[in-house]
Image (cartoon, rainbow, N blue to C red):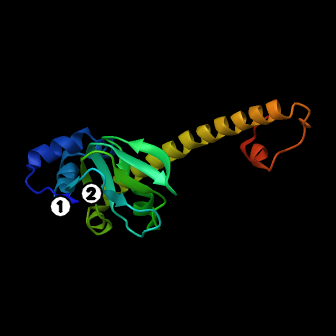
Amino acid sequence: MKKISNISKLKLLEFLNRIPLFKNLDANDRRTVSNIPDLVVMIEKGNVFIKQNHLDSDFYILLNGEAEVTVDKQFIAKTTPGNFIGEVGFICNEPRSATVTAKTDIIALRVTRDLFDMLPLKVRESIKQKIINGLVDRVSKQNVKIIKLVEQVDVLELKLDPDRDSNKQDDGIAHVLNIKKR
């Protein structure tokens, strides 16, 4: 990972103006964020910049490029410009829940916990709220995927065993997700 220090403040402010995470901030607050030292970094293709189970609280916002998110070497998602990544470790200060690898060269904003804590409270709270909203959205989308997968499994099980007891609850997942049997 290389720090990019030759970016103009004007260009950096232009980037911040376009990123949804900073939309609620006024111009002065975005200027404050733009003063974070070593904010812009270049991550080379193939570089693993977040490692599952490692304790690290850096938070990234992709300006360009693409990254792949994996858990236990299983593909989970692709992230693209405008998206943020590393928010769980950043907010919770816990080991990373996934590995993130640059699939292309990436230019990103990297916010460290120490530098974030130096921002004014109003700015920190606004950014944290946007991060939380993003997490809620991500969890909601994952829940929809889980429900669809459970329904697909149910259909396949029914095809394999058409005589199974349709009133029988599976291992609890159908009950937890409130899925009705067909």
Image spot of residue 142 (x, y percent): 56, 43
- Residue 90 vs residue 29: left or right? right
Instruction: Residue 181: tell me if it is visible.
Output: no
Image spot of residue 64 (x, y percent): 25, 42
**Residue that mark 1 sits on:** 38
Residue nearer the viewer, 165 or 136:
165
- Residue 50 vs residue 169: left or right? left
Residues under numbered marks 1 and 2 in contact, where contact means CB atoms less than 8 Å apart = yes
Residue at screen point 29% across, 64% down: 112
Residue at screen point 22% across, 52% down: 29
| Circle nearer the N terminus (1, 2) | 1
Residue 54 position (above or below residue 50):
below
Look at label 1 and name its amino acid: Asp
The tag on residue 110 is: 2
Task: Look at the image and tell me in which quarter the N terminus lies.
Answer: bottom left
Residue at screen point 76% across, 31% down: 155
Image spot of residue 165 (x, y percent): 92, 37
Q: Residues within 10 Å of mark 2 (few under 14, many from 20)?
A: many
> The residue tagged with tag 1: helix, strand or loop?
loop
Residue at screen point 41% across, 42% down: 78
Residue nearer the viewer, 69 or 61:
69
Look at label 2 and name its amino acid: Arg
Residue 91 position (above or below residue 29):
below
Q: Tell me where residue 145 sits by quadrant.
A: top right
Residue 146 position (above or below residue 92):
above
**So how many labels did they put on this image?**
2
Label 1 to label 2, Cα distance in Å?
Answer: 8 Å
